[in-house]
Image (spheres, coloured by chain):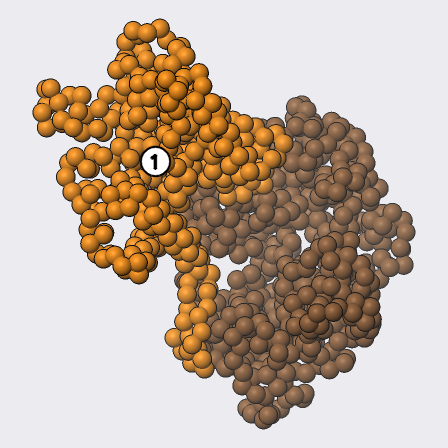
Amino acid sequence: MIVRLEPRGAVAGWVSAAMTVAALIVAFVIGGLVLAFVGGDPVRVYLHIVNAAFGNIGVISDTLVKATPLILTGLACALAFRMRLWNIGAEGQFLLGAWGASAVVLAPVLPVGTPAIVVIPVMMLAGAMAGAAWGLIPGLLRARLGVNEIITTLMLNYIALAWLQFWVFGPWSEGGFQQSVTFPRTAWLPRLTDFAASVPALGGLTTHLGLVFALVATAIMWVVVSRTRFGYEMRLIGDNPTAARYAGVDIARYVIVVFAVSGALAGLAGMSEVSGVVHRLQDRISPGYGFTAIIIAYLARLGPWRVVLASILFGALILAGREIQPSGVPAMIQGIILFCLIGSDVLVRYRVRVARRGAVGAT
Amino acid sequence: MTGSMDHPTPTMPLAIEARGIVKSFPGVLANDQVDFDLRVGEVHALLGENGAGKSTLMNVLAGLYQPEAGELLVDGAAVRFRSPRDAIAAGIGMVHQHFTLVPSQTVTENVLLGLPLPRFRLDLRRAEASVAEMAEGVGMRVDPRARVWQLSVGEQQRVEILKMLYRGARILIMDEPTAVLAPQEAEELFATLRTMTGTGRSVVFISHKLGEVLAVADRITVMRAGRVTAAAISPVGSTPADLARLMVGRPVLETLERADAAPGRVVLSAADVHASNDRGIESLRGVSLQVRAGEIVGIAAVAGNGQSELAEALTGLRRCTGRIVVDGVDIGGQAAGAALRAGVGHVPEDRARVGSAPNLSIVDNLVMKRFRRPPLARGPFLDDGAARALATDLKARYSISAPSIDSPVRILSGGNLQRLILAREIEAAPAVLIAVQPTRGLDVGAIEVVHRLLLELRTKGTAILLISEELDELRTLADRLLVMFEGRISAEMPAGGADLHEIGMHMTGGAGVEALAGMAAAVASAPGAPPP
C-alpha cells in the first residue's frame, strides 16, 4: 500500500474549515492519549475542563475575561500575517501597551481626581500608541531597510519585558515589591459586577469593558479586510508583492501602517488587562498572551470572527487547565493543537491518495 | 520481452506504447482514452493548444501522474510507474519547461545532484570528463565547469538534457522546449535532437508552434480537449493550416484585418533613459523613443539586450534616469503608481509572477488596476457587486475559461491567464500599452486572439509598444520597428517589408551576419517547409 499526496485545485471554503475542526479533534485525542499515558483519565479531565470553563455563568464570565486579551492580540497577529508579516512581537507590544496605559495613572499624566470618563479614553489611547510605537520599530526597519521582522519582533519582546521590569522594580515600585500601587477606581474599566447594585444577577462577574473593545475591533477588522480597498491591497501584497507593486501599491507604506495597527491592537490588549483585570502594573502581567495569539491566528485561519471563537477556546483552556495543573496540561494541549493545525495545512493543499501496489487501475 | 502486439506494421520497434490512457482532475477530463506510441529513433511531436492534455499525457509517461485507466508499455513490456524515479529507471526522462537547476553550482555538479553514486568521495575531474564526453556525443556545446547562473537559457536547457542522459534516459520528453529559446538556440536544439535520434534515442517533442513541429518531427500527433484528433500523421504533405485546424477545431484565420496606420499625436516619449539590470550592470544606455496614438511600435532584440528593462523602466517597475513623458506628464524615475495614473497599461513578460496574484480570485485579479476609481471604489470601500459584475462581463467577453469568477487564477492555463491580463489592461482604456512577449507560450488560437485585440486597440487610438522576440509577430503587427542591441536602439525602420537579414544584423550589432543569415532563412521558410 502506498500513500501519495496530490495537489488539490481550488480549495472550497468548507474543506479548510473541516480540516481545522478535524485538527482540533485529533489534537484532543492525542492530548487524551498523553493524559492516559501519565495515568490520568482523559474523559474526566476534558469534562472537568468543559465544566470549569463553561459550567455556569460565573466561569463563562471568567473564560471571557481570559479570552479578551487573546482576541485583541490574536487580531494583531492575524492582521500582520495576512500580509505575510510575521509579527511574533505581540507579547512585547502587549507589555508596552500595559506600560503606556499605566503611565497615565502612575507618572501621572493626568492629575489625581480626573474622572473616569477622561482617564479611560486617555489610557486606551496611551496603550494603543505605546503598542503602535513598539510595532513601528520592526515595521520601519522592514519597510526601509529590509530587516527580517521575525528577528526584530522576537527580540523586542525581551526588551519590552526588561523595560517593564525597570519601571515596576524601580520608579513605580510599591514599597520595593515588583508591582505598582493599585490604580484609583477612576482608572478601572467597568465590570459587570460593578452594576450588581441595580442588577443583582451580575454580582461577581468580572467580565469588563475590554471585551467590548475586542468585539468592536473584530467587527472593524472584518469590514476593513473584506470590504475596503485597504483590505484588497493587503490581500494583493500578501499573495504576490511583485504583482502588488505592478498594480501600483506602495508596499512600504502598507508594511508600516499594518505593523503600527497590529502593535496598537496588542497595546490595547495590554491596556485592557491592566485597567480591566489587574488594576496595577506588574512584571508578570502576561502569561504569554502574545505568543498564544500566534496559535490563535493560525487556528482562525486569519479570519477576524474566527479569532474570537479560537480565543474563547484558548481562554477556556488557560482557565480550566490551571485547575488541573498549573502549567503542564494546558501548555501541552496548546502545543499539540498548533502541531495538528500545521499538519492539517498539508491536507488542505493536498489530497491523500491511498493505492494498493499493483492495483492503481480503475478508480 | 514481447514485441508490440497489435500495432499495424511498425517500421521500427516501439519505444513507448500507451493505450487508452484516462486521467482526470476535478472538473476536467484531461486525457480521455488517449493512445500514443513512440518509435525508437524518431522525433514524435505532440501538438495541441494549452489545456489540450499534452502535458498530462507526458506526465503520465514520466511517472508524475498515475492514470485512472489504460496501459503503458516500454519496449513492449507493461510497466506501471509510481514516481519519476521508476520512469527514469525504465529509460524515460522528461525536461520540463521550468528548469530545476542550482544556480550556484557547476554544470557537472547539477548533473550529479540526486544520484546515489558516488556515495562519498566525489571525483569531479572524472565526472567532468564524462559529462563533457556525453555532451559531445550528442553535439552539444557545454562547459562542464561553468556555473549555472552564468549560462544562457539555451545552455541551461542543455544541462537539463544532460541530466537525463546521464541517468540513462533513452527516451526524452521535451515539454515546450522552444518557448524560452531565441531562434538560433532553437536551431541548435533541433540539431541536438537529430543527433540523439541518430544514436537510437527517441524524443517526444511537445509544442504548439506549427513551423518548428513540421521542421523537426518524424511524426505528429495532435490533441484537442483531452482527445487525439490526428494520430501519428506524417509531416510530409501537412501544412500549418491543416495542423492549426486539427488543433483548434476550426479553420484559423491567418490574415489579420489591419487598417492603415493613422498615427496621431505623440503619446509616449522617452528621452535618454538609463537603467541597470538586477545584477547592477547598466543595461539601458540612453534609449530615446516616441510612440504615437494609433500606432504599434515594435522592438526587436535578442533576449537580454535591455528590452525587458526598458519595459520595466517605462512602467515604473525599475528605477531609471531620463525623461519619460506620457501625455505631457513626466513619470521618469517614479514608482509604478505614477505610470498607472498617467495611463500606461502593461502586459508583463512574466504573467504568473508579475501580472497576477495566483491565489486570489479572477475578480480580484481583474480589478487590480482600477479598484482605486469609481464605480469600483466607493470612498474607502470596494464595491463587491460592481467588481463581480465587471468580472462576469470580462470573463464572457474575453472567453476566459474557468469554473467561476471566484476561481483562483493559478488554475488558469497560460492562454486563459493572458486573456485575463489583456482584458484587464485593455479595458482600463490606457493611453499607451506596453506589451512584452504577449504571445509567448500561447497556442495558435490564443495567439490569434491576442493579435486581434492589439490591432483593435490600435484602431481605437492607443499607442502600443510591442516588445517581442518573434520577428514574424513584429512584422505582422507593428507599424515601425526599433531594433535594440546592448541597451541601445541600433536601428529604426518601417515594419512593412523590413528585411530579415537587415533586422538580424542590427540585432547582433552588425556582427554574426553569417549565423543570422541561417536563422533568418529558417524563419522565412518555416511555414510549410518539409522536414530535412
Question: Can you say whether B277 is above or below B16 in the image?
Answer: above
Q: Which chain is orange?
A: A
From the image, state the color of chain B.
Answer: brown
Q: x, y (%) of residue B261?
A: 69, 39
Pointer 1 chain: A
Disc 1 packing (10 Å; few <14; some 14–19; many ≥20): many
Task: Identify which residue is drawn at 53% across, 39% down.
Answer: A150
Question: Can you say whether A245 is above or below A196 in the image?
Answer: below
What is the quadrant of residue A196 in the picture? top left
What is the three-letter code of the residue carrying label 1? Leu
Task: Identify which residue is drawn at 20% across, 48% down.
Answer: A48
Q: Secondary structure at mark 1?
A: helix
- Give the labeled residue for mark 1: A70
- Of B255 and B515, which appears nearest the observer? B515
Task: Identify which residue is drawn at 72% across, 39% down.
Answer: B310
Question: Can you say whether A277 is above or below B69 in the image?
Answer: above
